[in-house]
């Protein structure tokens, strides 16, 4: 899924937090975290992104989009 496809999916699920995965670590990934952030910012959806950090527990039960 490209960043633009992610933006389209995020629009379909308007209350969902978006957790990008598989954007770094292997050579075959074609879009970076910066590319994803730019696409979502351009669409006005950057606040929906939740970036996971390896080894750090992250709750997705509290989503600002639900308020």
Image (cartoon, helix red, strand yellow):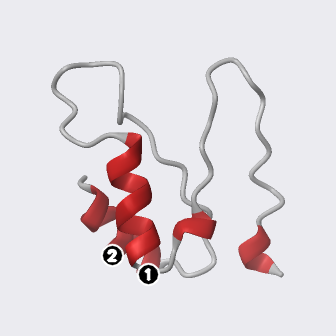
Residue 38 in picture, x, y percent from top left: 38, 61
Q: Is residue 42 left or right of residue 63?
A: left
Q: Which quadrant of the figure has residue 33?
A: top left
Cα distance in 3D space between marks 2 and 1: 5 Å
Q: Position of residue 7 (x, y in %)?
A: 37, 70
For mark 2, what is the residue?
8
Q: Residue at x 80, y 45 (%)?
A: 59
Badge 2 vs badge 1, beta-carbon distance below 8 Å? yes
As drawn, the label of residue 11 is 1
Q: Against 16, is 53 above or below?
A: above
**Does 33 appear above or below 38?**
above
Q: Position of residue 19 (x, y in %)?
A: 54, 50
How dense is the environment of label 2, judged by Cα within 10 Å: few (below 14), some, or many (20 and up)?
Answer: few
Quadrant holding the C terminus? bottom right
Side of 45 relative to 2 (left or right): right
Residue at screen point 44% across, 39% down? 21
Q: Which element carries disc 2, helix, strand or loop?
A: helix
Indicate the secondary structure of the residue bearing disc 1: helix
Residue drawn where x is 35% and y is 19% of the image: 25
In the picture, residue 46 is in which quadrant? bottom right
Q: Measuring 83% from the left and 60% from the top, which residue is drawn there? A: 62
Instruction: Give the total number of marks visible in the rendering.
Output: 2
The crowding category of the residue bearing disc 1, from other C-alpha atoms within 10 Å (few below 14, some 14 to 19, many at least 20), is: few
37, above or below 21, in the image: below
Q: Which mark is residue 47?
A: none
- Rendering quarter of residue 57: top right
Q: Position of residue 39 (x, y in %)?
A: 35, 65
């Amino acid at each position: 899924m490209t960043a633009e496809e992610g933006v389209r999916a995020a629009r379909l699920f308007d209350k969902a937090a978006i957790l990008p995965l598989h954007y770094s670590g292997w050579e075959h990934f074609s879009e970076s975290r910066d590319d994803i952030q730019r696409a979502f910012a351009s669409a006005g959806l950057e606040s929906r992104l939740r970036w996971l950090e390896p080894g750090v527990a992250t709750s997705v039960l509290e989503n600002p989009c639900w308020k």
